Each structure stands twice: as C-alpha cells, then as structure tokens.
Amino acid sequence: MNKSTFCKIIRILLVLMLVPASTLRAQDTPSDMSDYRGQDGKFFLFYVTGDDSGQCYGGEDNIYTDDSPLAVAAVHAGLLKANETKLVKVKVMAARNNYPSINRNGIISDQTDSSDGSYQLLPPSPDEFANAPTNMGAFIGKYDMIFLFRVTGSKEGAIWGGKDGIYTSDSEIATAAVHSGVLKLGQTGIVRIKMLPGRKSYPEFTSNGIASHSFDEWEGSYQFIKNETP
C-alpha cells in the first residue's frame, strides 16, 4: 500500500466516524437475500452480474432459497447470462417445503426441503429503478456501461475529483450528485452514471457548496450523464 492510498483510507475512516449512523446507507447488491429474511412480500431492485460457476437451490417459478447466490440464480432463471450485468427485481417470500432440482440455462440447481426463507426473481418494469449503492466500487471493469439509480442528494459523504465531472469509483454517489449539479441537497431523482477506467489524477474542486478531495491514481472512475431523461 503506497502512502497516497493509505492517506485516502484514513480520510474515509474519519468521514465515517463523523457521519451520523442514520445517514449511512447499505444499498449495495447483496450476495444473497438471507439478510432480508422476514420481509415477505417486499420487492427490491439490484444490479446483478451473472455467474454460472456457483450453486443455487430450487428455481421452480423462479423461486429460490434465500441463501442462493443472486448472481447464479439470475442466470439459472434466464434473466442474465454469465458476466452480464442487468437490473433484477427480487421479491422476498416465506420458506417453502420443497425446492426441486431444475436443469436450466446451463445450471443444475440443487434440491432441498429445508430453508428459512425464499425469494423470487422477476424482470423489472421499464420505469423501475434501483436505489443507488454507496459508491460505484462494485462496478469497476464495467467500463462505458450506463447505470440508472434513484438517489437523494447529500453532502455528508467523501468524494474525490469532480473538477472535470469525473470522480473516483469510491466517491459517494449521493454527495457527488450534488457536487456535480445533477441533484440538489435533499432532492431525490433518477441519475445516469457512466463507468470509466481509472485515471492518473483527480483534482480537488469546490462546487455547489461541497469541496472534493484530490487524489492521484485510482483504479476506476465514474461520471454523471446529464441532460438526458430515462
């Protein structure tokens, strides 16, 4: 770890210590739905990258045990191909008595009659959008892809860069959205974010009442695509 990266990590930790717990969000895509157990009937939207190398349980009517990996189940259900990233709609459901083994889309699911919860995978409607993750770190490598998120503008999170509209991938989206001018503080809206490769430097810049940090080389970047409607 070089000195620049170490200093950046320290700054992130200091920001998290100063931000009230109520402002911290956990909206990143989970590996499975076990943490959502008990929220039967609720729907969630996540960007998922397909994986055909793992194992899932069930799949009848696209219903899986809640500890089945979303990435594998989405390929099994036919909503994604391996390594493809798309928005997936998930319905939390109660446990079932049986989850049969099904051979579909190159994956053979396992059978089980024991589970503490279930979920069903569905294609999202055209007007449905996922809540924004904290940052775009999970999307590194998805360069030139554009993602749509619902986000509420904030000034509490740490951001790096932005002078030319480009931020490090770990810059908090809610804060960068206000800094860039696509949202006002407290405003909720749909934003378009384009993933970009890393850059050699990210100059600090003050805009819309928010001061960003400067940083040297970082592995991924993103920018907001403005003046377009979903």
Image (cartoon, rainbow, N blue to C red):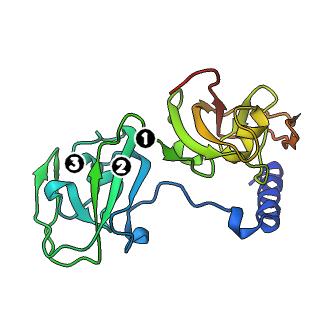
Mark 1 vs 2, N-terminal side: 2
226 to the left or right of 43: right
Q: Which of 226 and 218 is in front in this view?
A: 226
- Look at the numbered discs 1 and 2 and tell me whether their residues touch, using CB distance below 8 Å: yes
Name the element at disc 1.
Answer: loop
Q: Report, in whole angstroms, how far the alpha carbon at label 2 lies from the one at label 3.
A: 12 Å
Q: Report, in whole angstroms, how far the alpha carbon at label 1 lies from the one at label 3.
A: 20 Å
Residue 20 x/y as whole percent? 76, 67
> Which amino acid type is shown beneath numbered disc 3?
Ala
Name the element at disc 3.
Answer: loop
Residue at 61% across, 45% down = 151
50 to the left or right of 218: left
Crowdedness of circle 3 by 10 Å Cα count: few (<14), some, many (20+)? many
Residue 200 x/y as whole percent? 75, 32
- Look at the numbered discs 2 and 3 and tell me whether their residues touch, using CB distance below 8 Å: no
Mark 2 vs 3, N-terminal side: 3
Q: Nearer the viewer, residue 76 or 117?
A: 117
Residue at 43% across, 70% down = 35
For label 1, the residue is 128
Q: Which of 181 and 171 is in front in this view?
A: 181
| Residue 173: quadrant of the picture | top right
Q: Tell me, for residue 89, which label it has, or none.
A: 2
For label 3, the residue is 77
